[in-house]
Image (tube, helix red, strand yellow):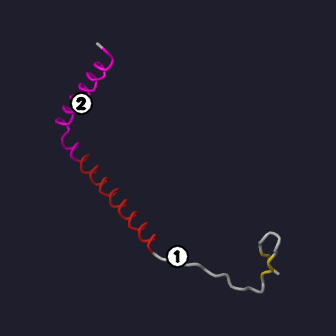
Amino acid sequence: MTTSQSILIAIEIIASLLLIWGFIHEDKLIAFEKKFARCIAVAIRKHKRKKQLARKKASSPKVVRKETYNPMIVHDLNNGQGRVA
């Protein structure tokens, strides 16, 4: 028996045990399926909103603010930073 065959047999055993557990605990399994489906739906909705906002940001014009003259700030020409007078 090779390693791949033994891994395949282990997976088949696990699958059959999960199937039996599903028949025994059907109500828990249905609750899990509903919760899982709700989580997936929320994730899809968030992804769509995120894409829509990104498209909206990309299509909106960029607003460039002009700096206005402030007599209280003295600009230092050496390093480009201003200091309050």
* Viewer-closest of 52 and 84: 52
Residue 28, quarter of the rendered image: top left
Q: Is mark 1 on a helix, strand or loop?
A: loop
Write the residue at 42% across / 71% down. Answer: 56
Q: Which residue type carries mark 1?
A: Lys
Q: Residue at x 26, y 28 (%)?
A: 14
Q: Where is residue 66 in the image (x, y as percent from the top left)?
A: 64, 82
Amino acid, disc 2: Ala
x and y percentages locating residue 42 in the rendered image: 33, 58
Which of 68/24 is in front? 68
Quadrant location, the C terminus? bottom right
Q: Residue 62 carries which label?
A: 1
- Image quadrant assignment for residue 8: top left
| SS state under label 2 | helix
Residue drawn where x is 31% and y is 22% of the image: 7
Which residues lie in the magenta part? 2-30
Q: In which quarter of the image is residue 80?
A: bottom right
Instruction: Give the class, few, some or many, for how many residues have Cα within 10 Å of label 1's Cα (few <14, many ≥20).
Output: few
Q: Label 2, on which residue?
A: 15
Q: Residue at x 82, y 75 (%)?
A: 76
Is 66 placed above or below 55 here? below
**Foreground of the two, 14 or 25:** 14
Badge 2 or badge 1: first in the primary sequence: 2
Q: Nearer the viewer, mark 2 or mark 1?
A: 1
Tell me residue 46's x, y (percent). 37, 61
* Residue 12 forms part of the magenta stretch: yes
